[in-house]
Amino acid sequence: MKRISWLKVKMFQRLSKRDILDITKDVHEIKKDYVRVIQGLDQGFDQKLSPSKIEMKDLVNILEESTQEYIKNSALDVRLKSKVDSRLVLRSTTI
């Protein structure tokens, strides 16, 4: 356990301040993407509907539409393509 901590310290000592800043920015962007996906899912479902099941292809379509809207609003030069060949059904479980 102590050896792992020591290795981590050595690894970070080798990083420049610029490297650390770049890593921090990447983590921030990943977090923003995660929040955007969750917001897209929230908007995709009407609270009154609260589905107990959804097909994977429908979930992917919701994510794709949300991401396409984000790309458009951000004026990014990104192409997104998705294909789902599965008829997998995701079911909600309550405890």
Image: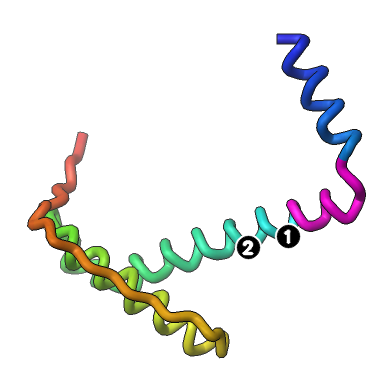
Numbered range of the magenta stretch: 15-23
The answer to whether the residues at label 1 and label 2 have Cβ atoms under 8 Å apart is yes
Please state if 46 lies on the left or on the right of 34 as rendered: left
Residue at image point 78% right, 57% down: 22
> Disc 1 designates what residue?
25
Please state if 66 lies on the left or on the right of 18 as rendered: left
Foreground residue among 30 and 14: 14
The answer to if 17 sits in the magenta stretch is yes
The main secondary structure of the magenta stretch is helix
Q: Secondary structure at mark 2?
A: helix
Against 12, is 48 above or below?
A: below
Q: CA distance from mark 1 to mark 2?
A: 6 Å
The residue most toward the left is: 87
Answer few, some or many: residues within 10 Å of disc 1's Cα (few below 14, many 20 plus, some between 14 and 19): few
Residue type at the position of mark 2? Glu
Image position, residue 71 (x, y; %): 49, 82
Figure quadrant of residue 94? top left
Residue at image point 48% right, 68% down: 36
Image position, residue 39 (x, y; %): 43, 68
| Quadrant for the N terminus in the image | top right
Foreground residue among 67 and 83: 83
